[in-house]
Amino acid sequence: MPWRLLRFGLSKSHPEPRMFTTHDTLKPSYDVVIIGGGGHGLASAYYLARDHGITNVAVLEKGYIGGGNTGRNTTIIRSNYLTPEGVKFYDKSVQLWQDLSTEFDLNLFFSTRGHFTLAHTDSAMRTMRWRAEVNKHYGIASEVVGPEDVKRATPQMDLSCGGHAPIQGALYHAPGAVARHDAVAWGYGRGADMRGAEIHQQTAVTGIEVKGGKVVGVHTTRGFIATNKVICAVAGFTPRITDMVGIRTPIYIHPLQAMVSEPMKPWLDSILVSGSLHIYVSQSSRGELVMGASLDPYEVQSTRSTLDFPEGLSAHLLDMFPFLSHVKVVRQWAGMADMTPDFAPIMGMTPVEGFYLDSGWGTWGFKATPVCGKTMAWTVANDKPHELITGFSLDRFRNYALTGEKGAASVGH
Amino acid sequence: MKLMTCPVNGTRPVSEFVYWGEIRPMPDPDACSDDEWAAYVFNRNGAPGVKKEWWCHTPSNTWFIAERDTEKDFVLRTYLYGDDR
């Protein structure tokens, strides 16, 4: 094997195909330009090509593929949301996830684990019952379980959580899963590339040309592109892009931090979430504990992490699992979460014709990657919002018709 | 540890403070249109920049204004409401 690697290293032409083609130049025009080469943008390019035959598409990525929030989340996939709009939308996503590895011929390490949302108070139990009833109504496997069921799934846990937050019960969601997040971007990217879409990394958008209320082109660091349709799928950079077309949105940016422990032998099967302790944790296929907490408390548009984050998160993790006190933290990082007032995304058409938003993905975007690609591609191809995303439109704020997902989208709110 | 300077109590750990968002002038609710009011209620300036923000030093309940670069997370200055000269 090392000799083979050496031969590739010394050879000028790589005999093995790369994941995607590198294009030296941008074409003067494209049918659709997608800003953002994360999971959402690449999935949109993939479904535009596969389902709608639109292949004259450029995906513009300022950095590298999957280097934004696609590679910065804690990879949890679930559909036990609170609103009918949310439940139907995320359920479709969970269904799409099941077949992705086969579809891409790429191992995404998709692993169905079961997902417990722990309730430490009576009011949390009330929200869990509410969510379970909404979920069951839409055919989602979701039920309220007692502390004994949590104990059976995770015998290592201190159910009293250090004595100050005893577990009353949990919402159990059997389809809850994890996947290797960067592989998802690579899988969608390769699939889009094979079908004719172009992926341009290291290409930042510097402006969007709008004439008579319609998109006519995009300025980039590598020149101007004429196009009538632009999808904005840039997570924490959304306000900078919407400013280019003069659209105001409720989106505000707070960092969300996460960290992983050193690898261990497998011991944690389930995904555990606690709103009261502000923590979510699962064990990856590499054996690392992947952990996240709530948002940083104030607006910052950068991905720097802080020292008080691992300190606080570790303290809460030790409340649940005191035996982890000697385990080391090996990495921490932050992503820029594009938050909305109702904790639901902002998707679909905008007042500027040809400008489509896939935004407001805050802390809940990874699990929605497949369904976002599918519904955004449909929306762009048909020029009307897909039925699954009508509850997520930008004008819901103007109409005071919010999609209140706060009780199910995140921890610690 | 990140620090914030309260105009009354001096420089303290940022964990003693609460962030209350950018200062947003309220339109006259009787004179403005429904759209203007909804824009005031919901819309935010999410792009980075130097912003004037409300902060509160919670142990002393001192509300003040911080001018902060939200990309670099750097506080330029802090002052009490009305002291902006």
Image (cartoon, rainbow, N blue to C red):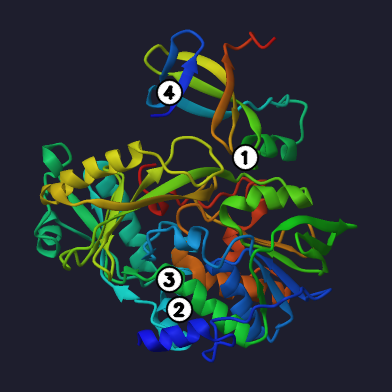
Q: Residue A96 carries which label?
A: 2
Q: Nearer the viewer, mark 4 or mark 2?
A: 4
Residue A91: which numbered mark, if any?
3
**Closer-to-camera residue (A147/A210):** A210
Closer-to-camera residue (B27/A410): A410
Q: Which quarter shows the C terminus of chain A?
A: top left
Q: Which of the labelled discs sits on residue B42, or is there none?
A: 1
- Image depth: mark 2 or mark 1 in front: 2
Determine the residue positioned at 70% across, 9% down.
Answer: B85
Q: Is residue B13 above or below residue A12?
A: above
Q: In this view, does A46 lie to the left or right of A245?
A: left
Which residue position holds label 4?
Answer: B17
Q: What element carries label 4?
A: strand
CA gap between label 4 and label 2 equals 44 Å
Q: Is residue A134 among the parts visible in the rendering? A: yes
Query: Please, is residue A306 above or below residue A47 in the view?
Result: above
Residue B23, disc = none
| Amino acid at pointer 4 | Phe
Q: Are marks 2 and 1 on the same chain?
A: no
Q: Which of marks 1 and 4 is nearer the N terminus?
A: 4
Q: Which chain letter matches label 3?
A: A
Q: Which amino acid does label 1 sit on?
A: Phe
**Residue A125 in picture, x, y percent from top left:** 25, 49
